[in-house]
Image (tube, helix red, strand yellow):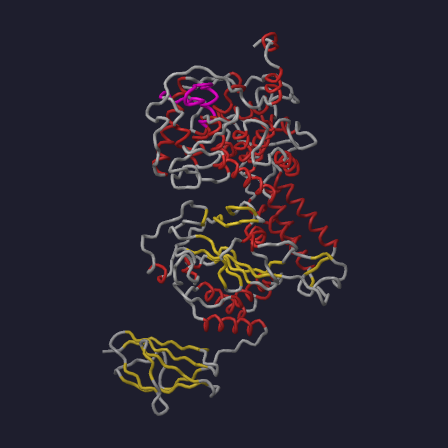
């Protein structure tokens, strides 16, 4: 379009194009062929599987459309190139064109203020080329883009900021040189993006649904309480904009229902792990999902209309819808899947494994934050551990060195392994420097906290620990610290109406639901709704997360619970009965299925050991380790008696102070393990060497009473099992002899 023609446009429209050029223009063009198979008023109440089938069919139709109407240039079709890559298309093969722009430098400058870098980075990735070695000039478009970040952290418009962050994140995943882009600069960019969020949770000053969906893509790869709050606000906004047909739309000029906005919302929701396919899920309205809403816009030829009653820009609608369809098919963000690309012309280096180093850095940071800084420990509580300021500085220096290598795009495996070794040495040195506090009087307050999956027979999700109480803490904040941001889904907010809906859990171990629960289940046990998450409605319709405080199940949200020193908090998964399987009383009209033992004291004792910086040393004692493991077994048994719990605690306490009793020696006369038995009846004597403990003899599960100082037994044909137990003065079994015998005919 000529400059002369542009001058005839309204000034406001001109400003809109200049400032928000990253958003492709929404022009209205005529088109034909609205898909008659899916009418505007059709009720789409179909299952998740049927939705997935329709989505895959839709993707195939999109690919066929593009094969006949091929994308051309990065400026116009960057999203289309990415969508076709995600659909599995290979641009090196027929029928795709041999695009000249894949090799020819377009000539824009490294500091250009538009979106040329973004368009070309994603287009090159879509056709399998490396943007870090772009064109015949070998330009690094990632490094050039990273240098465009301003002092406030943004890249200009909200649109450019979003896609610049995504592009550079992908560069990091690819392991290429991303210039000045690092963790610090990314945090600045995220802060700048969150500042663009409006009070109602939306992003930007127009096209709020589109902007909000795009912002969620970026936030899905970010951490921190502020990020989680931003995500929650954005979700609430999108939910408020969802219509009865499952679509997203409002009454404003820029948010009326259209395929572009629906597609952008879907892209953001899929990125943060939301299920937009399930007709019975959170994002379904009267059985209609965003999938149903979007697919109504697809034409017979595979393209998408902008509005149902107005074709609009088919090109713009189709490429954005194509990305959303790919997201739904793969159940993950197409944009971030680009980080998995293996370039055909890049054989320069092998894949580098940084997983162990990343985990060591995470552990080191938690370790560093678990201590108090002091000079001599006089100002540190008796229950706390302290180190000097120098100890912390030395440790932080090594942690930062490791972080640098972890984030270094071209780091070698040798550098990574060396950084891990040095960090492990630094951690050992730091742990040796730890000392117990000396201050008497005011002490740090703690609670015991754990997360349990006992009703599934899968033990602990988070083992018991002692967690320090901070000023202003509530249950939601403590759960967040325990699980980690991004590792759970919830409704409400941290400070009000917080409900723990799901936790990230990829446990593949066998589910073993106790029989007392199975006896109550009226329908067949199902499975998880999402493979990597565990929460409400998994396995049964009456499941979810509940919690108890000091052995009492609480019926209000975590945000309303204010912890007190010494509280024992046990977050527990109820698989059926909305807590009745946990021993809940008359919850929703259900009588408790079980009267569980009070395990708080034993849980707290285990938490003390788990939270002690010298845990490994404590458990190096064989008797302590044995008592520790036995305590775990008792805790995980939903039907365990109070006696077994108290007994486990007693033995653990004795073992910890070195008072655990030694096995009682049993003396047996007239019988030994290798003795051949030629007749079914025989007699023997058995007694405890301490002459204080009593003996229990059991033959084939039947107790044999002592008669005249000896035991008379009658063996059956075949295998026999004879057990001789010594019982101490507290009536607890201490030693056991087990003898298996066969009658010889």
Q: Is residue 743 left or right of residue 463?
A: left
Q: Quadrant of the N terminus?
A: top right
Q: Quadrant of residue 194?
A: top right
Q: Position of residue 154 (x, y in %)?
A: 65, 31
* Front-lying residue, 115 or 140: 115
Pick out the residue farthest to the right: 375
Q: Position of residue 720 (x, y in %)?
A: 30, 76
Q: Residue at x 46, y 67 (%)?
A: 634
Q: Is residue 473 left or right of residue 70?
A: right
Q: How many marks?
A: 0
Pick out the residue farthest to the bottom: 708
Q: Is residue 648 left or right of residue 528?
A: right
> What range is drawn magenta here?
300-322
With respect to residue 187, does 520 lie above or below? below
Q: Residue at x 47, y 33 (%)?
A: 266
Say if the magenta span includes residue 427.
no
* Front-lying residue, 394 or 506: 506
Q: Quadrant of residue 529?
A: top left
Residue 689 in view in this figure: yes
Q: Quadrant of the C terminus?
A: bottom left
* Front-lying residue, 188 or 600: 600
């Amino acid at each position: 379009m000529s400059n002369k023609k542009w001058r005839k446009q309204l000034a406001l429209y001109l400003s809109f194009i200049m400032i928000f050029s990253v958003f492709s223009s929404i022009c209205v063009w005529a088109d034909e062929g609205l898909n008659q198979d899916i009418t505007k008023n059709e009720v789409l109440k179909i299952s998740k599987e049927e939705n997935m089938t329709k989505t895959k069919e839709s993707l195939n139709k999109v690919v066929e459309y593009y094969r006949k109407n091929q994308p051309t240039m990065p400026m116009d079709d960057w999203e289309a190139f990415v969508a076709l890559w995600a659909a599995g298309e290979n641009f090196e093969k027929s029928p795709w064109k041999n695009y000249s722009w894949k090799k020819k430098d377009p000539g824009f400058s490294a500091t250009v203020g538009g979106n040329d870098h973004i368009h070309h980075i994603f287009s090159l990735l879509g056709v399998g080329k490396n943007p870090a070695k772009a064109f015949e000039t070998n330009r690094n478009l990632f490094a050039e883009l990273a240098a465009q970040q301003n002092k406030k952290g943004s890249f200009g418009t909200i649109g450019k900021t979003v896609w610049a962050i995504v592009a550079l994140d992908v560069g990091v995943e690819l392991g290429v040189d991303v210039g000045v882009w690092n963790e610090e600069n990314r945090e600045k960019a995220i802060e700048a993006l969150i500042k663009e969020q409006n009070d109602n949770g939306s992003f930007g000053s127009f096209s709020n649904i589109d902007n909000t969906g795009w912002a969620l893509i970026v936030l899905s790869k970010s951490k921190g309480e502020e990020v989680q709050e931003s995500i929650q606000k954005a979700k609430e906004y999108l939910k408020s904009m969802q219509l009865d047909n499952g679509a997203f739309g409002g009454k404003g000029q820029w948010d009326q229902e259209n395929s572009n906005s629906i597609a952008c919302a879907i892209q953001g929701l899929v990125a943060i792990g939301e299920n937009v396919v399930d007709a019975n899920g959170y994002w379904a309205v009267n059985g209609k999902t965003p999938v149903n809403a979007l697919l109504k816009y697809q034409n017979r030829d595979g393209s998408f209309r902008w509005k149902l009653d107005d074709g609009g820009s088919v090109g713009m609608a189709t490429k954005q819808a194509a990305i959303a369809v790919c997201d739904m098919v793969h159940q993950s963000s197409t944009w971030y899947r680009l980080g998995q690309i293996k370039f055909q012309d890049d054989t320069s280096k092998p894949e580098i494994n940084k997983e162990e180093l990343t985990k060591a850095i995470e552990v080191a940071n938690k370790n560093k934050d678990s201590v108090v800084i002091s000079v001599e420990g006089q100002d540190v509580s008796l229950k706390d551990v302290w180190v000097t300021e120098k100890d912390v500085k030395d440790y932080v220096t090594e942690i930062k060195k490791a972080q640098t290598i972890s984030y270094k795009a071209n780091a070698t495996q040798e550098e990574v392994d060396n950084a891990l070794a040095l960090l492990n040495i630094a951690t050992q040195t730091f742990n040796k420097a730890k000392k117990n506090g000396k201050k008497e009087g005011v002490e740090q307050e703690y609670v015991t906290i754990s997360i349990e999956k006992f009703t599934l027979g899968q033990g602990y999700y988070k083992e018991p620990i002692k967690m320090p109480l901070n000023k202003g803490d509530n249950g939601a904040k403590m759960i967040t610290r325990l699980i980690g941001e991004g590792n759970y889904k919830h409704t409400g907010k941290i400070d009000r109406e917080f409900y723990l809906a799901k936790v990230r859990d990829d446990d593949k171990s066998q589910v073993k639901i106790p029989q007392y629960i199975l006896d109550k289940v009226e329908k067949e046990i199902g499975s998880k709704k999402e493979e990597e998450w565990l929460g409400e409605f998994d396995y049964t319709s009456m499941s979810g997360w509940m919690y108890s405080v000091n052995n009492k199940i609480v019926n209000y949200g975590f945000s309303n619970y204010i912890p007190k020193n010494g509280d024992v908090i046990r977050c527990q998964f109820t698989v059926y009965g909305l807590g009745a399987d946990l021993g809940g009383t008359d919850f929703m009209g259900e009588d408790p299925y079980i009267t569980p033992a009070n395990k708080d004291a034993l849980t707290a004792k285990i938490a003390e050991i788990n939270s002690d910086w010298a845990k490994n040393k404590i458990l190096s004692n064989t008797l302590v380790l044995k008592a520790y493991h036995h305590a775990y077994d008792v805790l995980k048994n939903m039907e365990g008696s109070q006696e077994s719990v108290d007994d486990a605690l007693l033995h653990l306490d004795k073992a910890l102070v070195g008072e655990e009793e030694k096995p009682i020696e049993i003396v047996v006369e007239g019988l030994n393990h290798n003795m051949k038995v030629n007749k079914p009846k025989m007699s023997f004597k058995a007694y405890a060497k301490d002459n204080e403990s009593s003996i229990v003899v059991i033959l084939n599960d039947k107790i044999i009473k002592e008669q005249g100082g000896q035991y008379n037994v009658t063996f059956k044909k075949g295998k026999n099992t004879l057990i001789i137990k010594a019982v101490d003065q507290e009536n607890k079994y201490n030693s056991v002899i087990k003898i298996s015998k066969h009658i010889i005919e």
